[in-house]
Amino acid sequence: MCPSPGGPSAPRPTGWRLWVLGARPRTLPAAMAPVLVGTAAAVGAAGTAAGPAGIIWWRFACALIVALSVQVGTNYANDYSDGRRGTDDPGERVGPPRLVGNGLVEPARVRSAMLVSFAVTLLAGAPLVLFVDWRLALVGVAAVAAGWFYTGGPRPYGYAGLGELFVFVFFGLVATLGSTWVQSEQLPAVAWLAAVAMGALSTAMLVVNNLRDIAGDARAGKVTLAVRMGDRATRVLYVALLLVAFLLLPAMVAAGASAVVAVGFVAVVMGRRAVLAVLSGARGTSLLQVLATTGVVQLVYSLAVMVGLAIP
């Protein structure tokens, strides 16, 4: 899952606001970005000046709902499983409260919210399976399974240092390339480059989230990649992921994208403070701001790439 920035002293909501808290709305732009970029890649590759008119809108809507619902479902699954395992001990966490870990909602209700979210994922994906490509069913089932087993099940892979791989694959490659495929049933080279960039940025958000939680995760037995690599190497990995995304901008132009994608370099200015904070040893609550800034970097970058890809 993609992490959510927030503050440790934020007021605790009640009623329906609890479910908004559990859905982690600040992670949703990261789920939307690859769908927008992948769709734009399909429009641009078609070589038409039709622009947005060339989009098959019902397919776009289905892909977007799938991406958002699988993100929300994964967030609820993470809340449920980590809360049950004691990983979200409120005395250890630095960040927003969790539904189960902070005792705000009964675990069974959070599990039900997770199941509803994943059901929406499968229902929204059904038209794409029926009218575009039956193999998308395998992708959808894999995404839901990955969302659950991230922190759920007897051997969660998020506790074995594989969470970053899940984010890169499903919120980078699968979401971007899948959105391109449902529009055009083709996967041009530029879409692959954009997918890697989206994966790198989404993974960077998880990396800084896990960097913040190294001490608490280690005590709870959650062996994330950050716990395995250690503090220093995790900081280097964060910077490297951002560099990969920016280095891919000229590669996209070389692969046929409009030079407009280069506007994505504007995000370097926004990311500079986050990179300096990470390299200077920022910890705890200071990394919450880094997490928020990384989200802004991804948003600006994605918008520039989307426009650049959509222009034939």
Image: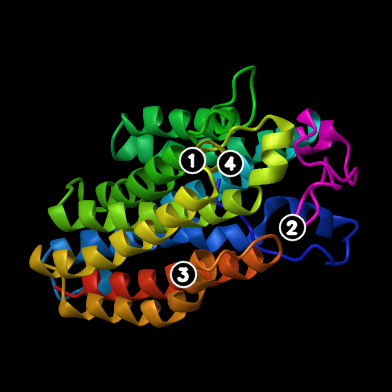
Q: Regarding mark 3 in the picture, which secondary structure is present there?
A: helix
Of callouts 2 and 4, the N-terminal one:
2
- Proximity of marks 2 and 4: CB atoms separated by less than 8 Å: no
Give the spatial CA distance, label 1 vs label 2: 22 Å
From the viewer's side, name the closer residue of 219 and 66: 219
Residue 116, percent across and down? 67, 38
Of callouts 4 and 1, the N-terminal one:
4
Q: Is residue 263 left or right of residue 108?
A: left
Q: What residue type is disc 2 on?
A: Gly
Q: Residues within 10 Å of mark 1 (few under 14, many from 20)?
A: some
Q: What residue type is disc 4 on?
A: Val
Provide the residue span drawn in magenta.
85-112
- Proximity of marks 3 and 1: CB atoms separated by less than 8 Å: no
The N terminus appears in which quarter of the rendering?
A: top right
**Mark 4 highlights which residue?**
120
Residue at 45% from the left image edge and 49% from the top image edge: 233
Residue at 37% from the left image edge and 69% from the top image edge: 302
- Proximity of marks 3 and 4: CB atoms separated by less than 8 Å: no
Q: Is residue 9 left or right of residue 310?
A: right
Of callouts 3 and 4, the N-terminal one:
4
Residue 190, percent across and down? 17, 58
Give the spatial CA distance, label 2 vs label 3: 20 Å
Label 2 or label 3, whichever lies nearer to me, is 3
From the image, give the main secondary structure of the stretch colored magenta: loop
Residue 295 is at least partly visible in this image? no
**Mark 1 highlights which residue?**
229
Q: What residue type is disc 3 on?
A: Val
Label 3 or label 4, whichever lies nearer to me, is 3
Of callouts 2 and 3, the N-terminal one:
2
Of callouts 1 and 2, the N-terminal one:
2
**Mark 3 highlights which residue?**
275
